[in-house]
Image (spheres, coloured by chain):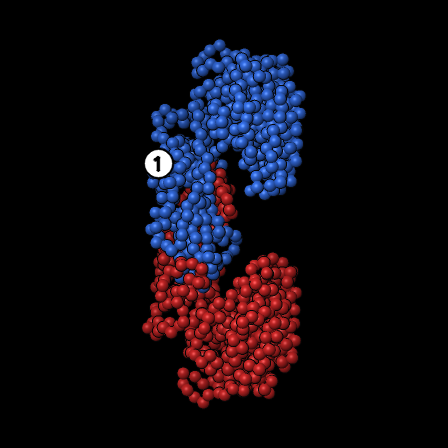
Chain colours: A blue, B red
């Protein structure tokens, strides 16, 4: 980082500290609306949250607020007559002399109930020991309110936003982001025209004490191996020993996908993985992490590696293969003596640069078909790709990341760790491809916030320092220096 | 078979032919009561069938008719407050100079509905082209009515039964025969005192044209391999590649149980299997069967053997291993990216003489544990026997079978095939052990009757010639010659 004339944030940060009660109250109101997108009976609450956002944005002086409709749910969804919740679009400023930043977040949440083991009502924001508990506090209402807080703080000071800001808040993120891809494609040259950079605050710090910026995500290719034999399930007493059993074939195919240490046994994949350069390897040196964090997260001692670098590199920059289950076989408790007639094994491969999806699928099909041929079985095999989503890798030293790094350093007084994630956030790629801009993942919460789990929380310090970081990021990005 | 002074059945068989309309009407009445033991809402219909039997037996002159109560369902069953249907006990004659035969059958049936694909109402007996269609026609109301028809024919002729006959008809056979074992043990020295032989008519001919007597059943040992890893299911994006996945371990264990040709890979089992003697091998020479029958039954070409002897011997007298499924993994349609934390693989081994259950379990546990040790996995494995049931093998040349063979020859003009079955009928062993008598399986219906399937049927000829066979069997058994 070059040291240049720095920006003075003292007034802005002081105002943010002063407005803390307002900010917490805003989050409180948001958490109180149980906007669970996965529970169709609560769909009206998701719409209510969109209206809440519209009211807040109106009060904050947003222009051109749109609750952009996405139509009805697609037919494959449980209730196809139900309307999808809208995307909340708004803009603050449209000065052609300023850069334009789009901020993305989501206002729907995961299900939650006291019976799941919450200590408090998940849909009341409860503050205890400087921690805010409630569903959505960290995922993702906290970060979304954060952006509104940024504007409130600027308004309170009569301070102009340094950039044009566009909000894009969705209400179906926890349920597959139905309709969002299409909206982004549609608005790329409409509402989103002129966007210079995108910021997504919807992931987490790696640990609990050090802020991070995230520059990479693995992709995922999901495969299914079908083995078909008899025309219907058979009784194992009558047919055991005299027919070739599809499940006996399938377990052999599944057993030869990855070794017990997780190494993928499909030939040709390793060669596609970008080599680890010395420079990249060094990026892992300072990252705060150890095997204990992993063991705590899994509640077990099942880690395949003990050193920080191996763990993080295998989570972020190497492919992995997981077997998820079998469809068509007996899967309940108890003992059923069936010979399943048609079984489908499911597995997925997490992809990384430079694995090409089509090439990978070719290798997978070839591997499984060759394995099956060795079995000399009269059954039939069929291997298919169920879905794929590309990996994402950004340049963590570009203008967008540099602004966020400066902001983080300013607020937290430490350089953020540069992290990647093992999972995928497909919307990241969509923004990058459709808007042809850099996308930054700027997490607000900590690694132990328990998104999707019980007693989800957001530390007050993360919330308030997060507003400062979000604010400073806009200013550094506007300043534009690298 | 020795040829001795044969019995003249001409009057009896003529009377049976004459009573055909009555016999069909009796079966009609029985089929019309939907005594589905597995459907608790139909439980009153099962009781109604017991009352129907009581009325019929009363009219036929039975003594000491008892609807022996079995109490309430055990607590592990869906509705533990529900009464079990009674065992219908009755006796015809108690002459100490005569031998005593116990006949077993069941008056409950499998579920059935038009929506399943029946061409006619399953609970109306429909006669078409000399075939009787209806749920329970073959399994097992036809054979049960058969015994009542035997008595009606004797009564109509004023002919004394040649043996003392005891009926034992149960109403929970299709739902695990709850309570029957206990009743048999209880009545061994009570109602069943003095029983010389037991006959069960509750299986089928091997094919469609040749009658059979059945002298053996395989047993079954059901096993579960649990592999436990993380404390909860994990997201494969976050944890794929850095934890040892229990399902990856489990498929390897399951893959090494049997080879693709069905050969069991667990050491020490083959050595326990009784060697095939030349004499036993010859028993298979005349049996009517070929691979086409097997392929028709499976609706596929998945047979592991093409010759009759190999197929039948691997169904009847060699052990087999079937994998049934996995509990705890993703098992639905679609694509879920979970890493299951605890998975249970289920498999069973069909047992034959002289495999001992406890010895087998020891070998299974040793095999799986050794395999698991090779994986060098941090997960935990646990192998357990879920349930076992012994094989059964009788002497097909004893007095009981000899009487049945003579009867079959008399009625069908052909020596019956001597068959075994791949599945188990646990009650066979219970009768043998508790009453210390020979048990004979004397099937009435054909291999294609579709018991448990749609459009279950019983050919009129099997029903009526079956009554003659059942009758002649009693007479030959009374005559006692070998």
Q: Quadrant of residue B148?
A: bottom right
Q: Nearer the viewer, residue A321 or B360?
A: A321
Residue depicted at x 46% and y 71%: B208
Quarter containing the N terminus of chain B:
bottom left
Whether residue A201 is visible to the viewer of this picture, yes or no, is no
In the displayed structure, would residue A255 be above or below residue A405?
A: below
Q: Residue furthest bottom?
A: B5
Residue B258 in percent (x, y) is at 38, 56
Task: Look at 37% across and 40% down and name the residue there.
Answer: A362
* The quarter of the displayed image where residue B120 is located: bottom right
Q: Chain of mark 1?
A: A
- The image shows residue A390, relative to residue B250, as above or below, that is above
Quadrant hosting residue A258: top left
A331, A15: nearer the viewer: A331
Residue farthest along the top direction in this orientation: A5
Q: Residue furthest front?
A: B129
Q: Nearer the viewer, residue A352 or B481?
A: A352
Quadrant occupied by the C terminus of chain B: bottom left
Residue at mark 1 = A270
- Tell me the crowding category of disc 1: few under 14, some 14 to 19, or many 20 or more residues within 10 angstroms, Cα based: some
Question: Which x, y percent locates residue B111?
Answer: 58, 62
At 63% across and 24% down in the image, what residue appears?
A65
The residue drawn where x is 49% and y is 73% is: B443
Task: Please tell me which residue lies in front, B307 or A323.
Answer: B307
Q: Secondary structure at mark 1?
A: helix
Residue A153 visible to an observer of this rendering: yes
Q: How many marks?
A: 1
User: x and y percent of residue B212 in the render?
Assistant: 45, 74
Q: Is residue A423 left or right of residue A364?
A: right
Relative image position of residue B113 (x, y in whole percent)? 59, 61
């Amino acid at each position: 980082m070059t040291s240049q004339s720095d920006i003075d944030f003292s007034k802005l940060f002081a105002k943010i500290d002063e407005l803390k009660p307002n900010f917490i109250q805003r989050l409180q109101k948001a958490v109180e609306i149980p906007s669970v997108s996965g529970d169709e009976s609560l769909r009206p609450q998701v719409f209510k949250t969109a209206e809440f956002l519209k009211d807040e944005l109106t009060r904050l002086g947003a222009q051109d607020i749109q609750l952009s409709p996405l139509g009805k749910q697609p037919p494959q969804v449980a209730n196809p007559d139900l309307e999808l919740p809208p995307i909340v679009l708004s803009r603050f400023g449209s000065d052609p002399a300023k850069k334009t930043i789009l901020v993305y977040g989501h206002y729907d949440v995961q299900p939650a109930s006291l019976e799941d083991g919450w200590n408090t009502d998940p849909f009341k924001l409860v503050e205890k020991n400087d921690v805010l508990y409630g569903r959505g506090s960290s995922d993702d209402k906290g970060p979304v309110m954060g952006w509104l807080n940024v504007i409130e703080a600027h308004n309170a000071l009569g301070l102009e936003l340094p950039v044009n800001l566009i909000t894009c808040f969705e209400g179906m993120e926890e349920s597959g982001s139905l309709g969002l891809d299409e909206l982004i494609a549609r608005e790329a040259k409409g509402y989103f025209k002129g966007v210079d950079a995108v910021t997504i605050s919807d992931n987490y710090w790696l640990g609990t004490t050090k802020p991070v910026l995230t520059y990479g995500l693995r992709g995922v290719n999901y495969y299914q191996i079908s083995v078909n034999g008899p025309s219907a399930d058979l009784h194992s007493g009558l047919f055991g020993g005299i027919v070739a059993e599809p499940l006996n074939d399938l377990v052999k195919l599944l057993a030869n996908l990855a070794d017990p240490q997780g190494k993928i046994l499909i030939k040709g994949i390793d060669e596609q993985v970008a080599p680890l350069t010395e420079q990249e390897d060094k990026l892992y040196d300072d990252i705060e992490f150890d095997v204990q964090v992993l063991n705590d997260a899994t509640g077990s001692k099942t880690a395949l590696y003990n050193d920080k670098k191996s763990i993080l590199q295998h989570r972020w920059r190497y492919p992995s293969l997981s077997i998820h289950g079998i469809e068509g076989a007996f899967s309940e408790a108890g003992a059923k003596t069936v010979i399943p007639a048609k079984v489908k094994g499911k597995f997925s491969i997490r992809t990384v640069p430079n694995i090409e999806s089509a090439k990978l699928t070719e290798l997978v099909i070839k591997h499984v078909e060759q394995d099956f041929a060795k079995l000399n079985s009269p059954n039939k095999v069929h291997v298919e790709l169920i879905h794929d989503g590309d990996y994402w890798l950004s340049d963590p030293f570009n203008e967008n990341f540099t602004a966020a790094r400066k902001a983080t350093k300013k607020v937290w007084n430490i350089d953020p760790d540069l992290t990647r994630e093992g999972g995928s956030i497909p919307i990241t790629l969509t923004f990058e491809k459709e808007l042809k801009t850099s996308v930054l993942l700027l997490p607000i919460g900590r690694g132990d916030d328990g998104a999707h789990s019980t007693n989800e929380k957001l530390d007050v310090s993360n919330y308030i320092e997060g507003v400062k970081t979000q604010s400073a990021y806009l200013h550094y990005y506007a300043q534009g220096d690298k």
